[in-house]
Image (cartoon, rainbow, N blue to C red):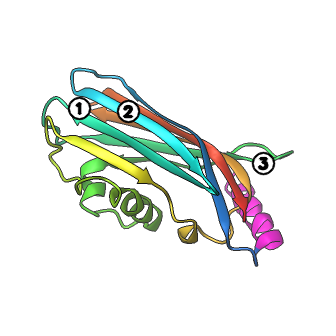
Amino acid sequence: MVLLRLYLLAVGGYFGCCLASYVLQVDLFSFAVDDPAIIVSQSAYVEQEQNRSYLSGHLIFNKTVNEITMRSSMNISRPRLPEVRLFDVKLNVCQMISNGYKNRFVRVFYNSYASFVNTRPACPIKANFNYTLTRAYLNEKVLPELLPQCIFRMQLVFQHQSKPLAHMQLNGRLSRA
């Protein structure tokens, strides 16, 4: 399986290595609450403008939360090729918020989106505070050059004290500009 992933990235990179510009289109941005006693209000929506997708939404927690675990996975599919899982990781959200992760992809992804929140998130997560994400987007220039054109599905599942808290899904397409 690892060899298949490397092969797909290498072949995709070979045919498009000189075209480093991407268009990242998000078709679905959903956030569903599994524990309404902790998350009392939320919204999530995507806006399309020219060749960019903007994500917006908000979260309000009913109580202070200092332990959140996130399981994140991303699958990609391409015509006539099997679906490939790029990653499936479990992260401590408080450690991620404090930039405690060494993984470049995690840091870039988090820092890209955290800059669009009305306050820099910190643990513990505040109760009764409206965390608002406004027109967030991922700068396509931070994406590695060897990514193939594909359809992607990213799922994030959040837990608090080993109980389901919420889940989020992003579906979209990555294509060359």
> Which quadrant of the structure image shows residue 125?
top left
Task: Tell me which label, 3 or 2, sits earlier in the chain.
Answer: 2
Q: Report the span colored magenta.
A: 1-16
Q: Which residue is mark 1?
A: 161
Residue 40 in view, yes or no = yes
Residue 83, percent across and down? 72, 43
Can you name the residue that lies furthest to the bottom here?
18
Indicate the position of residue 58 as horizontal and vertical percent values: 32, 39
Could you say which disc has been placed on residue 78 in the image? Answer: 3
Residue occupying image coordinates x 67% and y 49%: 173
**Would you say the magenta stretch is mainly helix, strand or loop?**
helix
Real-space Cα separation, disc 3 to disc 1, in angstroms: 37 Å
Residue 36 lies in the magenta stretch: no
Residue 176 is tagged as none
Q: Let me know if residue 75 appears in the view.
A: no
Q: Which residue is mark 2?
A: 43
Q: Could you tell me the amino acid type at mark 2?
A: Ser
Residue 43 spot, x, y in % from top left? 38, 33
Residue type at numbered disc 1: Gln
Mark 3 or mark 1: whose residue is earlier in sequence:
3
Residue at the farthest front position: 49
Q: Amino acid at mark 3?
A: Arg
Residue nearer the viewer, 48 or 76 = 48
Mark with earlier residue (1, 2):
2
Depth order, front residue of 133/72: 133
